[in-house]
Image (cartoon, grey):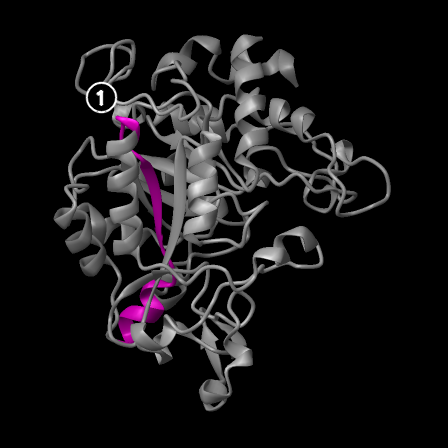
């Protein structure tokens, strides 16, 4: 795979977003030696909107390989490890506050089931066509949600993380923005965020639209401008189209499996699938309102029936031709999440050859990667830049 590096964009383009990693924190923003979108140099264009090292390491829900996801503890650890960007997923409360949870179903990520006062809130709902039974953020006020505590989502895989169950609250986005502002001042550089709108069509139908409250908060904290240190992202293209009318910052369209359809497409009757969106015509359409894509890693290098990697697709080349960033998801260290080629031993929860897998993905020319284990991905990125 390493031999394909030049064909996928070449090592020279890794300087497009500023190749220097600054100390442990690593985010290079508006400093000497970094490329900026408006400097007329190699960083110009959509990929230059974020002056970040390449490959960029995005801490997926924080350092979720080590702490319960979407907690201030997970975010802080990711930042301390040196992650370049830290991800938040947004869902609303009943009274319209934006909180950080991977899903509005909080059954598996909080101790809500242990609260008898909320037993009657358990419900079965259809969310983006899937029937789910549990407790949902839109049925709780923020004050009620704050009585809950976060816990590890996949305890069978990450038993060590369960020691932190009950330690942190569910954070609001505003609390995260305040935290980022404080940490940015302390470190002398901005804290980059990657903020996702979850199920925006579903919530808009409930009168709990995500985009306008998100834009309002970003404006309040000065993060709505072209060079603001955050991305916004969504699996629903219409959400990013809506955000393009509300803020000037970079927007990313997330892409699931090739055969899937974004839920807003299902709702509107748009017949296109993700397979259509990753074709040159689809990427050109995305580039008309967004600056990047976040494809599943299988869209970059598919796996065969046994789970081994095959040959890379042309997605990296085609996206870069439209000046789109690529931040694929998600790398995790455990065998069960890795391609079969890079698993070690028979324990599905043991760590595999994650460095080999990351090097293979970096060699395709991707601009960054989401990782549950940002320390591992950072070291792999540093090794790759040194090759």
- In the image, 387 versus 63, the foreground residue is 63
Q: Position of residue 320 (x, y in %)?
A: 39, 24
Check if residue 286 falls in the magenta segment.
Answer: no
Q: Residue 227 vs residue 195: left or right?
A: left
Q: Residue furthest bottom?
A: 120
Task: Tell me what residue is drawn at x 22 percent, y 50 percent.
Answer: 243
Q: Position of residue 325 (x, y in %)?
A: 38, 30
* Residue 279 appears in the rendering: no
Q: Which residue is mark 1?
A: 37
Is 19 rendered above or below residue 350?
above
Q: How many marks?
A: 1
- In the image, 312 versus 50, the foreground residue is 50
Is 143 rendered above or below residue 57?
below
Give the extent of the magenta segment.
Answer: 187-206
Quadrant of residue 51 within the rendered picture: top left
Label 1, secondary structure: give it.
loop
Check if residue 205 falls in the magenta segment.
Answer: yes
Q: Residue furthest right?
A: 346
* Residue 94 appears in the rendering: yes
């Amino acid at each position: 795979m390493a031999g394909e590096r030049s064909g996928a964009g070449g090592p020279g383009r890794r300087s497009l977003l500023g190749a220097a990693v600054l100390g442990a924190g690593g985010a290079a923003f508006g400093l000497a030696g970094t490329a900026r979108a408006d400097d007329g140099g190699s960083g110009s264009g959509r990929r230059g909107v974020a002056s970040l090292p390449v490959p960029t390491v995005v801490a997926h829900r924080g350092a979720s390989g080590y702490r319960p996801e979407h907690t201030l503890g997970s975010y802080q650890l990711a930042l301390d490890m040196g992650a370049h960007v830290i991800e938040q997923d947004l869902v609303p409360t009943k009274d319209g506050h934006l909180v950080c949870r991977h899903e509005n179903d909080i059954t598996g990520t909080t101790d809500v089931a242990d609260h008898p006062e909320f037993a009657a809130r358990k419900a079965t709902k259809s969310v983006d066509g899937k029937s789910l039974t549990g407790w949902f953020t839109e049925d709780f006020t923020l004050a009620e949600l704050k009585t809950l505590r976060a816990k590890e989502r996949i305890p069978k895989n990450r038993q060590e993380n369960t020691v932190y169950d009950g330690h942190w609250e569910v954070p609001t986005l505003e609390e995260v923005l305040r935290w980022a502002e404080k940490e940015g001042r302390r470190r002398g550089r901005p804290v980059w965020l990657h903020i996702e709108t979850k199920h925006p069509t579903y919530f808009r139908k409930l009168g709990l639209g995500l985009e306008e409250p998100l834009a309002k908060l970003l404006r309040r904290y000065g993060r709505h401008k072209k060079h603001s240190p955050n991305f916004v992202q969504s699996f629903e293209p219409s959400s990013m189209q809506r955000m393009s009318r509300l803020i000037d910052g970079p927007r990313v369209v997330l892409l699931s499996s090739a055969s899937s359809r974004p839920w807003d497409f299902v709702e509107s009757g748009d017949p296109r699938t993700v397979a259509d969106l990753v074709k040159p015509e689809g990427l050109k359409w995305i580039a008309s309102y967004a600056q990047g894509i976040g494809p599943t890693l299988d869209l970059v290098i598919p796996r065969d029936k046994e789970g081994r990697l095959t040959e890379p697709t042309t997605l990296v080349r085609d996206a870069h031709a439209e000046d789109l960033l690529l931040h694929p998801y998600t790398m995790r260290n455990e065998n069960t999440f890795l391609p079969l080629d890079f698993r070690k031993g028979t324990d599905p929860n043991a760590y595999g050859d994650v460095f080999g897998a990351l090097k293979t993905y970096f060699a395709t020319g991707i601009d960054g990667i989401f990782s549950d284990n940002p320390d591992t991905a950072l070291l792999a990125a540093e090794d790759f830049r040194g090759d």
